[in-house]
Image: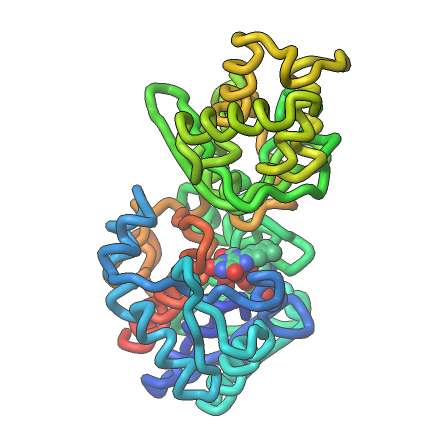
Amino acid sequence: METQICIIGAGPAGLTAAIFAAQRRAQVLVVERNTTAGRKLLKTGRGRCNLTHTGSIDDFVRAYGSCGRFLKPALYAFPPQQVRDFFHSRNVPTQEEKDGCVFPVSNKASDVCKCLLDAAQGLGVVFLYGRHTEHITANQHSFEIRTNKETIFSRAVILATGGASWPMTGSTGDGYRLAADFGHSIIAPKPALCPLVTEEKWPGCLQGLGIPNVRIRAAAEGRRWESEGPLMFTADGIGGPAVFDLSRHLTDILSHNEKPVPVHIDWLPELDSQVLENRLLAEFTTHPKKEPAGILSGFLPRQMAQQMQTLLLGNEKVLVSQMSRLQRKNLLNLLKSCPLTIVRTAPLEQATITRGGVSRNEIDPTTMESRLQSNLFFAGEVIDADGPCGGYNLQIAWSTGALSGLSAAKK
Ligand SMILES: Cc1cc2nc3c(=O)[nH]c(=O)nc-3n(C[C@H](O)[C@H](O)[C@H](O)COP(=O)(O)OP(=O)(O)OC[C@H]3O[C@@H](n4cnc5c(N)ncnc54)[C@H](O)[C@@H]3O)c2cc1C
């Protein structure tokens, strides 16, 4: 079988690459190991698909941090607003929420996936499903792509195989091996946007409980991070958006350092310490016969209030009128700067994204072409580039997909 461009992987990056290449009249074949396209895409945003974020290209570059500069040309090739326009013009209008996250109005990831598939098929892109790409070699003028069913000859290849997280969706890290065969360096894949495991066992007692808004501060190796948002207690630690964003930074530290990372959580960031202290004192005066948990349940979920009391006083029964000045100070500290010790991240299988991948140094950011192998391109999560929660990772897939597809077709 022969084609001009062979794309490995029918996730958001591969589908976008296919559309942009086919729009340039290239002959495009997509090889996908699953029997359907976009299996991970269907899971995004809990099935609602947070497909991008509001903001300018510069805002995105800043949000991506160290990989922002690398992603800038791709963001110009298919900017966030054009992504929204693309879906809108194909009957999948989008809307932004208060926090800037953008979703399809239908709140259905399946609409996003179908829209991409329809667009690609409408442009004549051919899909081969149930094909596991096992090996790729380069001959003088073409690539030989060996799948479990056939050998395909193609002038260009776009690797869009995703990372190594949520492997049940098809992204098992194959792209790293296929890229390494061409001499590419792989930055060690690590879990990111994932729960964190704590040394303390008490968070596990609150498993499933959510706190609507917390502020977490962390410091390690001379660097500091802060993140704010909802938190969810897990079986062995903490999760939820505020934790996920922090995990993106801590994963690097925890993977090369055996030392745990201390974090401090403000459970009530909307109340400054003085205001909170005054309000607590007023409550203590009005309800002297209550235990601290009885007062705290006016500020936090009941189970959490009880946990704070246990951390403060153990199993001792103390009324608020009996609390010493030191106990009151310690309570305020627990509410505004509760210490936890992070020992590791959740495993890669449970992480929303993979941090690490094909080294950016070996990819031309203006084309997404390999600097080591002519006509080999990369798109999406297989690249060592990642962003915070909020639609930033799908934007990487759309933008690098578009740029790789355009560049491959041009060549
Ligand atoms: C639960 C969950 C929720 C998420 N929610 C969001 C969100 O709301 N917003 C956001 O921005 N990001 C979200 N993400 C991240 C986002 O889904 C990924 O960043 C994105 O899917 C990456 O796209 P991709 O095309 O690079 O890779 P993938 O989506 O992983 O697609 C890669 C494709 O390649 C195929 N493949 C792999 N190896 C081979 C092979 N050897 N041969 C043939 N085919 C192969 C796979 O089967 C797969 O279909 C979420 C991730 C998860 C797990």
Residue 21 at least partly seen: no
At x 24%, y 66%, the residue is 76
The residue sitting at the front extreme is 286
Q: Nearer the viewer, residue 180 or 91?
A: 91
| The quarter of the picture showing ligand 1 | bottom right
Q: Nearer the viewer, residue 133 or 354?
A: 354
The C terminus sits in image quarter: bottom left
At x 32%, y 75%, the residue is 82
In the rendered view, tell whether residue 117 sits above or below residue 187.
Answer: below
* Residue 4 occupies quadrant: bottom left
In the image, residue 298 lies at what x, y percent?
61, 38
The N terminus sits in image quarter: bottom right
In the image, residue 149 lies at what x, y percent?
67, 71
In the image, residue 10 lies at what x, y percent?
54, 70
At x 39%, y 61%, the residue is 100
At x 40%, y 50%, the residue is 387
Residue 52 at least partly seen: yes
